[in-house]
Image: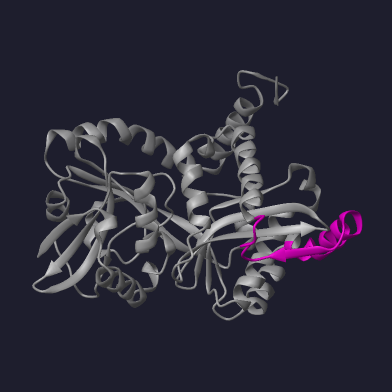
Amino acid sequence: MRFDVVHPGELTPGEIGRWRGLQTLTPTLRTPFLSPEFTRVVARFRPRTRVAVVHEGDEIVGFFPFEHAPLGRGLPVAPGLSDAQGLVHADGVTWDAREMVRACGLSVWEFDHLVADQRIFDEHRTAEAASPVIDLSEGFDAYHRVVRARSSRVRDLPRRARRLEREHGPVRFVLEATDDAAAGALDTVLEWKSAQYQRTGRSDRFARPWIRGLVHQLLGERTTAFRGCLSLLYAGDELVAGHFGLRDHGVVPTWFPAYAPSMGRYSPGLLLHLAMARAAADDGVELIDMGRGAKTYKDELKSGDATVAEGRVARLVPTAALAWARTAPVRSARRAVDRNPRLYDVADRMLRARGRWRPGQVNGVSA
């Protein structure tokens, strides 16, 4: 087994084709976050991004994308953003995970959204979590019957849509906005998302220039089946809600959904997701992955759950121990909160209170 570590921009067309071919062989690998195009675009903004091309004899049997952080700490590509992580590999091929980490020049590789069927990492998992999904493999109508029977809020959405249309104009939905106005609409959606992060006391991802730049770059990425996907919901000429995500291999992970706060009474988030599911199913999408994390709207809309894992592959070296000391307490606390609904509710209320009273604001409004 040989591991050739390269910058993503150095991958040849043949290697990219092989990577995409390996993805098609295993359903859990058919996610845009594990596509070569995602890794290559991220590398423009995160220069420490690398790929280990795994050879067995003369055959390429795998691709391992990662970020080489200081002190030999290995992270997933686009750390904190990627909702699917792991090794893209041929079926039936296995090797030692620690040996792979060593060959990549790392002391440890940490993951928090490892996809299922990654046998090489079995002994290195420390926790698992549900990732709610919308299964569209049998079409939208079959999916909709299931969630409509289960959720009174979903059953009430047609009434809310009619009210929205009556008060603001005809409702229309765009699955993939590609016109000249798309970049401006994307900025609006990102501003809504930033305001949501701040309002709920979360870290504002879009305050970091590399993330905002990455999203705009991905909007224009349409060279293959992989592409950025900006979905927009309008009432009349007014933008009500939007979502920016990715699309590849018939899978759309939800990434950054947001809506106009003034439209909250119409349940715009649910209307957006349901419209996206209907249009995506008609356009050949088989799965919408809503990502790990407890959210009421996910429980309302999901048809099932995938499983993702977190953990670390560590070598017996001092820098791996240092990385563990820095990250383990925070992760343990987060797992405890995620597993206990009462703790999660308390933590959520505290974060929202912090968002309302953070410095520079009066009653939650910028001073």
- Where residue 134 sits, quadrant-wise, is bottom right
- For the N terminus, the image quarter is bottom left
Residue at 51% of width from left, 39% of height from top? 205
Q: Is residue 96 visible?
A: no
Q: Is residue 161 magenta?
A: yes
Callout count: 0
Residue at 65% of width from left, 72% of height from top? 279
Name the residue nearer the viewer: 5 or 330: 5
Q: Is residue 112 above or below residue 55?
A: above
Q: Residue furthest right?
A: 166
Residue 84 location (% of width, % of height): 40, 57
- For the C terminus, the image quarter is top right
Name the residue nearer the viewer: 102 or 216: 216
In the picture provided, is 303 more to the left or to the right than 292?
Answer: right
Magenta-highlighted residues: 154-181
Q: Is residue 358 visible?
A: yes
In the picture provided, is 155 more to the left or to the right than 326?
Answer: right
Q: Is residue 291 magenta?
A: no
